[in-house]
Image (tube, helix red, strand yellow):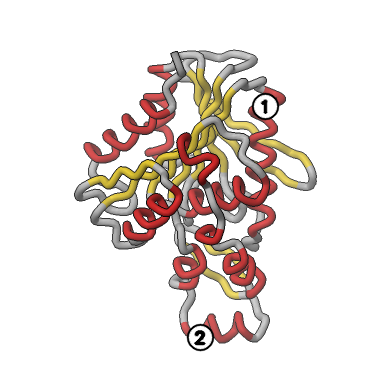
Amino acid sequence: MVEKHFDINEDGCSVRCKLFAHKDARIYQRVVICTHGYGGSKDRANIAKFAEKETAKYKTDAVIAFDWPCHGQDARKKLVLSECMEYLTLVVGHAKNALQAQDIFIYSVSFGGYLTLKYIAELGNPFRRIALRCPGIRMYDLMKANVSADDWTKIEKGKDVMIGMERKMKVDKQLFDDLAKSDVRKYEYFDWADDMMILHGTADMTVPIEDSRAFAENNVITFVPVEGADHPFRDPKLMDFAIHTIIEFFAPES
């Protein structure tokens, strides 16, 4: 498998990306964009594993992973939702224009799943099919859970605070106001439901499976509960099942 690091430097952004492919080529008819969750990066092992299996089965496909703002190798220090939307727009544009993709798919996890749902509802849907694993449906509540009581008091007073996992990032009241405004439960996804799938582990202690179940039912989206899987799908067999299910969902139409 070919792996290439590259940056998309446009509109004042520098999006750190990684391309996976079975063979080196100039264009790819089908491109899958992979997005990581909160605190993750494009270099997650599960992304590489998905890309390896996707490009092995569909040998003319490419997979692109990238770092969300304030994650991985990204240079930004403060998390801003509109900048997340800009990053995804630039990656979609690269797939369409530089790689000349006829079809673009997206596989998004957790925070990335929330951002994907926000993107298609507010900016339009460029994706042929969408697979979400443990998406952060109630992202406002999930993000607030990372903030201590003392820091929340500071946020309410208009101050920045630092939160994070492998690396810290600044957040402020504007971020939480934007999360509340972009509550994906208020949007309707019926027009895209046939081309969407949500997988969620029954043992997820980070993002409640009932959030995904209710969201899928309300929008008539295919829902796949994965028995025993936790939030990161640490069990290799369950991760393999999730990857296999998504790759089959992304199969070319005959």
Indicate whether 126 appears above or below 251.
Answer: below
Q: Is any atom of residue 159 visible in this view?
A: yes
**Amino acid on which the number 1 mark rests in the picture:** Lys
- Residue position for label 1: 96
Q: At which x and y percent is residue 32? A: 52, 30
- Residue position for label 2: 150
Number of residues whose C-alpha sits closer than 10 Å to that of mark 1, classed few (under 14), some (14–19) or many (20 or more): many
Q: At which x and y percent is residue 252? A: 46, 18
Element on which disc 2 rests: helix
Q: Which quadrant is home to the N terminus?
A: top left
**Distance CA(mark 2)–CA(mark 1):** 45 Å
> Sequence-wise, which precedes: disc 2 or disc 1?
1
- Observer-nearest residue: 140 or 19? 140
Identify which residue is drawn at 53% across, 23% down.
62
Indicate whether 11 appears above or below 174.
Answer: above
Number of residues whose C-alpha sits closer than 10 Å to that of mark 2, classed few (under 14), some (14–19) or many (20 or more): few
Horizontal relation, residue 214 to residue 90: left or right: left
